[in-house]
Image (cartoon, helix red, strand yellow):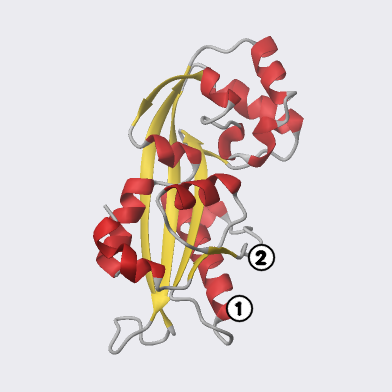
Amino acid sequence: MLQPIMSELSAMRIVLASGSPRRRHMLSSIGLKFEVVPSTFEENLDKSSFSSAVEYAKETARMKATEVAQRLKEANEPDLVIAADTVVTLGERIFEKPKDKKNAFEMLSQLSGTTHQVHTGMALITRKKGNSCQPDSPFIITQFHETTEVTFGDLSPEVIQGYVDTGEPLDKAGGYGIQELGGTLVKGVNGDYFNVVGFPLYNFCRHLAQLV
């Protein structure tokens, strides 16, 4: 999808506001040249103040991107800052990264045998050019999201504990990584697989093509 604009993209300074190795890998896999500048935003927004998990994830992504864009604007300002935030929901419950192995076990026990949702909020920040509908901001912010349904098999406590003991769940929303050992827990996926990994590639490329 990006091949027609790859020359324009290669001339841009693109910054990924995330230290996630999975997001780095996916951006590299589509041929983008970019720098990694992880956001220092604390990710401590009050979930109860948002109308939905989607809005919470989108705002967290916006805050991550804005923090990096503000930090870099005085020295070789980037042309594009990319940020994402992924959460897992089951009913009204929001699952982010587990705090420890005990928390990971609890999360996975709740997700066992269910169909849950994976939401990724995205924020793309570009330099303001000419007139803008955001006059109070030095940036133009584009926000969107992707939602994917994931169905887990019925997992025994032994299976869950064995997976938790690998340490893999600790840095992943919902406590599992579908692209690694966590994929063995998944019975089915409805929607964008890459969104479950943490970066909705198709939706990202579609919006990026509209911006360039």
What is the x, y in percent for residue 143?
37, 62
Q: Looking at the picture, does residue 94 appear above or below residue 39? A: above
Label 1 with label 2: CB-CB less than 8 Å = yes
Which corner quadrant of the image does residue 138 belong to? bottom left
Q: Which residue is mark 2?
A: 40
Q: Residue furthest front?
A: 7
Between 10 and 51, the one lying in front of the other is: 10
Position of 3 with respect to 116 (left or right) is left
What is the x, y in percent for residue 177?
56, 32
What is the x, y in percent for residue 3?
28, 56
Q: Looking at the picture, does residue 165 appear above or below residue 128? A: above
Q: Could you tell me how far apart the alpha carbons at marks 1 and 2 are, in whole angstroms?
A: 10 Å
Q: Which residue is mark 1?
A: 71
How busy is the neighbourhood of tag 1: few (under 14 within 10 Å), some, or many (20 plus)? Answer: some
Q: Amino acid at mark 1?
A: Arg
Q: Amino acid at mark 2?
A: Thr
Q: Secondary structure at mark 1?
A: helix
Residue at horizontal 71 percent and vertical 32 percent from the top? 103
